[in-house]
Image (cartoon, helix red, strand yellow):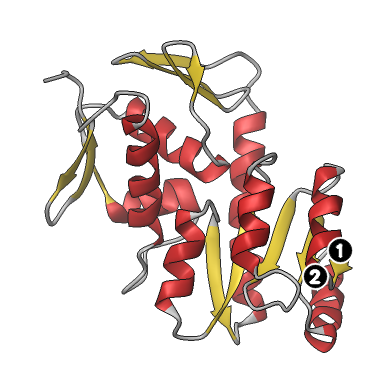
């Protein structure tokens, strides 16, 4: 059974959401105060976090920034409908996915299952799976990526993205394939989440001196270069 934490100040919504998730075999804890929610995440007893953007004590962005300073827990941001800025900012700060309010409960379950399935897939390796390209070393079992003995601070989704790209180095991967392999769902129209995750990985590699290794192939997708330029 997966343990889910909901941080949202909407009492009525969180009660209904918790009941629905429990009916779908998830264990749920609801916290309506942002600071208390951060402390719960620090305890490390949760598999996934549902985080609202609009909260009075601290907004979801600040909560996410604080959580990402000590945890890579998968995070789905719950954003106001039509607020593209909120979704993009959430992804830039390290959210794994987002869902606009009001949302279909079945869609939420699908997003949760996609993220938890990714974690299960990575933890199911019986042997350490490693890869080393252009000075980037990845280890699937521990979800670690290292450049010159310096660990890259990646979220779980960013690690999965880098791993998939590296394992297909030299081959163009379509956005549809990457979305399925990394996010666990087909790419929908106007969905920029995959592009934002790629941008985040590029920035973090750049900070460690790895430039232009992930190429955008216009009209096709992305390519991790096999040969360094």
From the top left corner, tell me how far across and down residue 116 is, in percent. Answer: 66, 49
In the displayed structure, would residue 18 be above or below residue 139? below
From the top left corner, tell me how far across and down residue 39 is, in percent. Answer: 85, 51
The residue nearer to you, when weighing 139 against 124, is 139
The residue nearer to you, when weighing 126 against 8, is 8
The residue nearer to you, when weighing 147 against 141, is 147
Which structural element holds mark 1?
strand
Which structural element holds mark 2?
helix
In the picture, residue 80 is in which quadrant?
Answer: bottom right
Q: Which residue is found at the position 70% from the left and 77% from the top?
A: 55
Q: Which residue is found at the position 86% from the left and 52% from the top?
A: 40
Q: Which quadrant would the C terminus be assigned to in this image?
A: top left
Tell me the number on the disc at residue 12.
none
Q: Compare marks 1 and 2 and give the one earlier in the sequence.
A: 2
| CB atoms of marks 1 and 2 within 8 Å | yes
Q: How crowded is mark 2: few (under 14 residues within 10 Å), some or many (20 or more)?
A: some
From the top left corner, tell me how far across and down residue 11 is, in percent. Answer: 85, 84
The residue nearer to you, when weighing 18 against 207, is 207
Please state if 219 lies on the left or on the right of 214 as rendered: left
Q: Mark 2 points at which residue?
A: 21
Residue 26 appearing in the image: no
**Which callout, 1 or 2, points to the residue nearer the camera?**
1
Q: Name the residue under label 1.
A: 28
Estimate the spatial distance between the alpha carbons at disc 1 and disc 2, rounded to whole Å: 7 Å
Q: How many labels does the image show?
A: 2
In the picture, residue 161 is in which quadrant?
Answer: top left
Residue 154 appearing in the image: yes
In the displayed structure, would residue 106 be above or below residue 165? below
């Amino acid at each position: 059974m997966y343990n889910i934490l909901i941080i949202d100040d909407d009492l009525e919504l969180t009660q209904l959401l918790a009941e629905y998730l429990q009916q779908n075999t998830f264990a749920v804890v609801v916290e309506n105060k942002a600071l208390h929610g951060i402390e719960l995440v620090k305890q490390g007893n949760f598999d996934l976090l549902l985080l609202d953007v609009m909260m009075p004590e601290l907004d979801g962005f600040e909560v996410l920034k604080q959580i990402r300073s000590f945890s890579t827990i998968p995070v789905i941001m719950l954003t106001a409908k039509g607020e593209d800025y909120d979704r993009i900012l959430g992804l830039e700060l390290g959210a794994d996915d987002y869902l606009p309010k009001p949302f279909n409960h079945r869609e939420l379950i699908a997003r949760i299952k996609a993220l938890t399935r990714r974690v299960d897939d990575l933890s199911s390796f019986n042997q350490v799976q490693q890869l080393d390209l252009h000075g980037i070393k990845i280890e699937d079992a521990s979800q670690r990526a290292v450049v010159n003995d310096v660990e890259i601070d990646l979220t779980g989704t960013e690690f999965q993205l880098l791993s998939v790209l590296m394992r297909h180095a030299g081959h163009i991967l379509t956005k549809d394939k990457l979305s399925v392999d990394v996010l666990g769902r087909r790419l929908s129209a106007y969905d920029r989440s995959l592009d934002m995750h790629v941008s985040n990985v590029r920035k973090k590699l750049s900070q460690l001196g790895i430039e232009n290794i992930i190429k955008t192939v216009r009209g096709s997708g992305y390519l991790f270069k096999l040969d360094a330029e």
